[in-house]
């Protein structure tokens, strides 16, 4: 909410769902679009390959042009997703690593493996009652899509070994004075807040106008208002990564562990990826795991609109209408079909609260964004 991404809820929000409910496109969440494939199984290749094919269809829809940078790859609101915009995850029970009822031990084990741990409902949600956690590789930038899905497989292999070990056996300026004062305080109290860590008064004062200074403050507003944030910043416009490059390059280098002048390259081909099992099959069954809920998604933003943190209500509604026209192509294709579910009052595909809550419970629709303070 602080970053402005949840503004005007629920206008301009909804989701397209395919007939088989395994291909979903969120509209109006943290990015304009979150495009994802999900199903229960053990073969990561299947969900990865289907998403790649679906993206080729979406990318080919006339009138859609996504925000892409020659240096940063696909542009996203949050710098953690920049580059591929891709998050590949699996829901896996870790009863031994979560036996205290929290994910603290699981996070401590997962972080050195390059993995992130979330609750089953996404970021800032609790783990499952049985210790089920959402596990995904942390890296998105200066890494290829193929490397991410392979990293998930190899990370799960190592995490499973730690879970078994834990259980003893196999288991499942003046105008900105107040903000600058707050930033200085957070630098001391929360040194791991990356936005605040890499914000410098010297760079801030070097900006050419109060308009630029206000825009940079807007980018880091989430880190100012939520001092315990890990990233603490969101881009408001696709151009912000270039506009404030001296700031964002340091944040990106620190978070993604790359050089400040690194350039991102997208590549979905698994050929030649380090750590790929023989035969190229990322089959979780070979790790002794049962069928698990698997999901791979990418974030995409349309070039013609501001990023979600800076959108007006009119922007959000117009972006949703543009995507609804694009969804007509998907609905006409036998391999997708399905329909759109809008949260915008008065929309032709509007769904009521009961239908919305059912989609949330089924892990298809995103939750009320206005309830997330970040």
Image: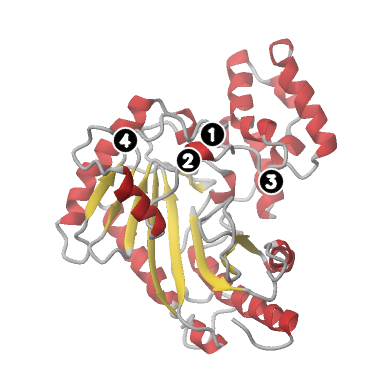
- Residue under label 2, please give it: 369
The label number, if any, that marks residue 319 in the structure image:
4
Q: Which residue is mark 3?
A: 230
Residue closest to the eye, 295 or 126: 126
Between disc 1 and disc 3, the foreground one is: 1
Secondary element at image label 2 = helix
Mark 2 and mark 1 in contact? Answer it, CB < 8 Å: yes
Observer able to see residue 63? no
CA–CA distance in space, label 3 to label 4: 30 Å
SS type, badge 1: loop
At 69% from the left and 88% from the top, the residue drawn is 169
Horizontal arrangement in the rendering, residue 330 relative to residue 25 (left or right)? left
Q: Is residue 322 visible?
A: yes
For marks 4 and 2, give the CA distance. Answer: 17 Å
Residue 99 in the image: above or below residue 316:
below
Front-most of residues 36 and 269: 36
């Amino acid at each position: 909410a602080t970053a402005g991404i949840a503004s005007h809820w629920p206008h301009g929000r909804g989701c397209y769902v395919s007939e088989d409910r395994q291909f979903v496109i969120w509209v109006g969440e943290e990015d304009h679009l979150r495009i994802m494939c999900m199903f229960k199984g053990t073969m990561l290749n299947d969900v990865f390959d289907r998403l790649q094919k679906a993206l080729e269809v979406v990318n080919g829809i006339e009138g859609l042009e996504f925000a892409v940078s020659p240096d940063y790859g696909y542009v996203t609101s949050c710098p953690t997703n920049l580059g591929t915009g891709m998050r590949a995850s699996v829901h896996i029970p870790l009863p031994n690593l979560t036996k205290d009822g929290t994910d603290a031990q699981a996070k401590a084990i997962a972080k050195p493996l390059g993995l992130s741990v979330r609750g089953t409902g996404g970021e800032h949600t609790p783990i499952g009652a049985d210790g089920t956690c959402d596990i995904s590789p942390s890296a998105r930038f200066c890494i290829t899509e193929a490397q991410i899905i392979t990293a998930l497989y190899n990370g799960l292999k190592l995490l499973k070994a730690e879970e078994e070990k834990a259980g003893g056996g196999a288991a499942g300026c003046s105008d900105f004075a107040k903000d600058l004062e707050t930033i200085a305080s957070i630098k001391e109290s929360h040194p791991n807040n990356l936005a605040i860590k890499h914000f410098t008064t010297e760079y801030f004062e070097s900006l050419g106008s109060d308009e630029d200074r206000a825009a940079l403050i807007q980018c880091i507003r989430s880190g100012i208002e939520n001092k315990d944030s890990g990233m603490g910043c969101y881009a408001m416009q696709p151009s912000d990564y270039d506009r404030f490059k001296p700031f964002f390059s340091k944040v990106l280098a620190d978070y993604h562990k790359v050089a400040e002048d690194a350039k991102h390259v997208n590549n979905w081909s698994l050929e030649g990826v380090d750590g790929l099992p023989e035969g190229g099959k990322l089959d979780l069954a070979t790790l002794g795991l049962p069928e698990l809920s698997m999901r791979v998604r990418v974030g995409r933003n349309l070039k013609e609109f501001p990023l979600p943190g800076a959108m007006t209500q009119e922007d959000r509604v117009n972006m949703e209408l543009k995507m609804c026209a694009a969804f007509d192509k998907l609905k006409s294709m036998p391999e997708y079909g399905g329909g759109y579910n809008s949260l915008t009052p008065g929309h032709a595909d509007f769904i009521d609260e009961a239908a919305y809550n059912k989609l949330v419970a089924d892990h298809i629709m995103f939750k009320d964004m206005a309830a997330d303070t970040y």
